Amino acid sequence: MQVVRLVKTSDLQQVSELIKKTGIGMTTMPKNRKEVQERIAWSVNSANKKSANPNKDTYLFVLENEKKIIGISAIYTSVSKEKPSVFFKLKKIKLSSDTYKFEKTSDILQLHLLHKPYSELGTIFIDPSSRGRGRGSLLSFARLQLIAAHKTRFDKKILVEIRGWKDKNNKSYFWESFSKAFFNLDFFSIDRLSYIDNHFITESVPKFPFIVELLPKRVQKVLAKPHPNAMPALSMLAKQGFKTNGLVDILDGGPCMEVLATKIPIVKSSFKVKVEVKRSLNFSNYGFITNYSLNNFRVVRENYNLIKNNTIEISQKTAKALQISTGDKVRINIESI
């Protein structure tokens, strides 16, 4: 059975091996084993802390299939609390002339610092040999289930950065024909360094606005355009109320999406029920089932019976995956996902 859960210290070997398959494109997860161990410890500590308020926490999830870890994802809280996040922002300005009585609206792109803390969905990857069968949505939406069960641990606003467009040769026109001019390092070095400390970006990128129609044509075409492989994720997020906010990644020009946590349908529709474990039964419902633990948080997408407004019946296999028993409480969603 497939289950998404929070990472444990004993997962170090499997997580390290999985991360090796991500390539250089994923800079939010370190490749060094010692740093991976530190990232896992950060997640474990976040789940075990007594304070229920967001404070630069990381929650690292693993997708497990028959005890094999085949995917990872994460939530980061209080992003920009200590240092602002850096983006470009797409805006519209009016150009006018009193002398010749004309007005014109133009799109501009300008450096933008985001100071107010937010929680970010990120670091999602599934082993290429294990993709499909709804695993991407399970791994992605498990993060929203954690928010639903433990709302006070997350910021009011949830943001996600969508990977920017690249061609079939993995070439970013936005980088090659625009952003590259501001730096003397390669794309991945800057991406990696910006995750550690992004202050150098505010020093390197001009503060004045760039008029979009004056940018190279191929930059205009890919500005705020998602990578083709990111379209399924964008579609899933849009159904959960995420909308583009005009922010654009400094390096690849990818769009950002945001939503208030209280407005996410899967969070709003989630509610608490009691569990009855049955040996065998015919199921009438299917969807997410989430246990109520934090440091042993687990989510499955399985069959169940809603027999009363506050009780569901589940199989022994599902109970084992969630590590719960009859009488325990879980969260479910009535609406189909």
Image (cartoon, grey):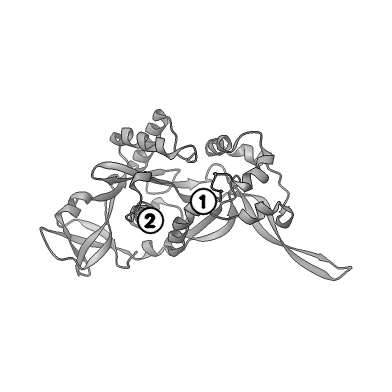
* Kind of residue at badge 1: Glu
Horizontally, is 184 left or right of 309 in the view?
right
Residue 200 vertical position relative to residue 253 in the rendered view, above or below = above
Name the residue beneath numbered marker 1: 161
Residue 237 vertical position relative to residue 119 in the rendered view, above or below = below
| Residue shown at the point (48%, 57%) measured from the top left | 231
The one nearer the camera, 123 or 52, is 123
Label 1's element? Answer: strand
The one nearer the camera, 156 or 325, is 325
Residue 264 visible in the snapshot: yes
The one nearer the camera, 184 or 86, is 184
Q: Residues within 10 Å of mark 1 (few under 14, many from 20)?
A: some
Name the residue beneath numbered marker 2: 144
**Residue 110 position within the rendered picture, expressed as x and y whole percent measured from the top left:** 68, 51
Q: Residues within 10 Å of mark 2 (few under 14, many from 20)?
A: many
Q: Quadrant of the C terminus?
A: bottom left
Label 2's element? Answer: helix
Q: Residue lying farthest right?
A: 99
Q: Residue lying farthest front?
A: 168
* Kind of residue at badge 2: Leu
| Residue shown at the point (63%, 48%) measured from the top left | 174
**Residue 93 position within the rendered picture, expressed as x and y whole percent measured from the top left:** 72, 62
The one nearer the camera, 310 or 202, is 202
Determine which of the numbered discs, if any, sits on residue 243 in the image: none
The Cα–Cα distance between marks 2 and 1, rounded to whole angstroms, is 16 Å
Residue 50 visible in the snapshot: no
